[in-house]
Image (tube, grey):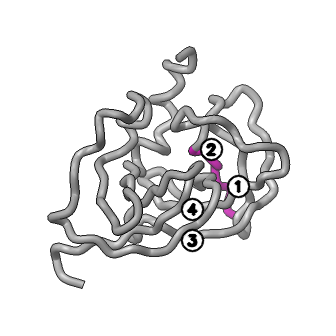
Amino acid sequence: MSATQQQFCTFYIQSLLFGVEVETVQEVIRHLEMTGVPLAPEVVAGLINLRGQIVTAIDLRRRLGVAGRRAGELPMNVVVRTGDGAVSLLVDEIGDVVEVEEKDFEKAPDTLSSTSRELIRGVYKLKKELLLVLDTQRSVNISATAGNESH
């Protein structure tokens, strides 16, 4: 892989393809039981026990302001490492690891909602779809969402 290429772990939210840098991903796992957290911001789906490590699970659907999952649809976990430790991003479906050229990076389209645009660093045009690059740090920063729950 050359210096102008980057690898992203991809996943879907609704029909949109998102990616986070492979280096930030600790692991990808199927649905785990969660413990609810009273009085937590609505983006916090709960806590999961990952082999003895307690990890906060953030529902990316809520974080991005899209409709919730239907009953019976179980999210999958993309566990990312942040400055504050591991955090699980709840996603609909896991994709592949994709390699992209830095030169193909473009800023986020204006058609995204302001909430989404805040969390998406930019896009890569793949052969069949757009890869939306998620800003991992902003996505897991729940204190930034606490003040704007009323949108």
Question: Which callout, 3 or 1, points to the residue nearer the camera?
Answer: 1
x and y, in percent, of residue 44 in the image: 64, 39
Provide the residue span drawn in magenta: 53-60
Q: Which residue ends up furthest to the front in the rendered image?
A: 128
For the residues bearing labels 4 and 3, Cβ distance under 8 angstroms: yes
The amino acid pointed to by label 2 is Asp
The residue that mark 1 highlights is 75
Spatial CA span between label 3 and label 1: 15 Å
The amino acid pointed to by label 4 is Val
The amino acid pointed to by label 1 is Pro
Depth order, front residue of 50/70: 70
Mark carried by residue 59: 2
The amino acid pointed to by label 3 is Glu
Spatial CA span between label 4 and label 2: 12 Å
Taking 47 as reference, is 109 above or below it? above
Secondary element under disc 2, as helix, strand or loop, is: strand
Q: Residue at x 34, y 65 (%)?
A: 126
Q: Residue at x 62, y 44 (%)?
A: 59
For the residues bearing labels 4 and 2, Cβ distance under 8 angstroms: no
The residue that mark 4 highlights is 79
The residue that mark 3 highlights is 27
x and y, in percent, of residue 5 in the image: 23, 74
Spatial CA span between label 4 and label 3: 5 Å
x and y, in percent, of residue 69 in the image: 72, 43
**Mark positioned earlier in the residue sequence (1 or 2):** 2
**Mark positioned earlier in the residue sequence (3 or 1):** 3
User: Taken as a whole, is the magenta stretch helix, strand or loop?
Assistant: strand
Q: Which residue ends up furthest to the top in the rendered image?
A: 150
Asked if residue 89 is among those painted magenta in the image, a careful observer would answer no
- Judged left or right of residue 87, residue 131 is left
- Judged left or right of residue 30, residue 4 is left
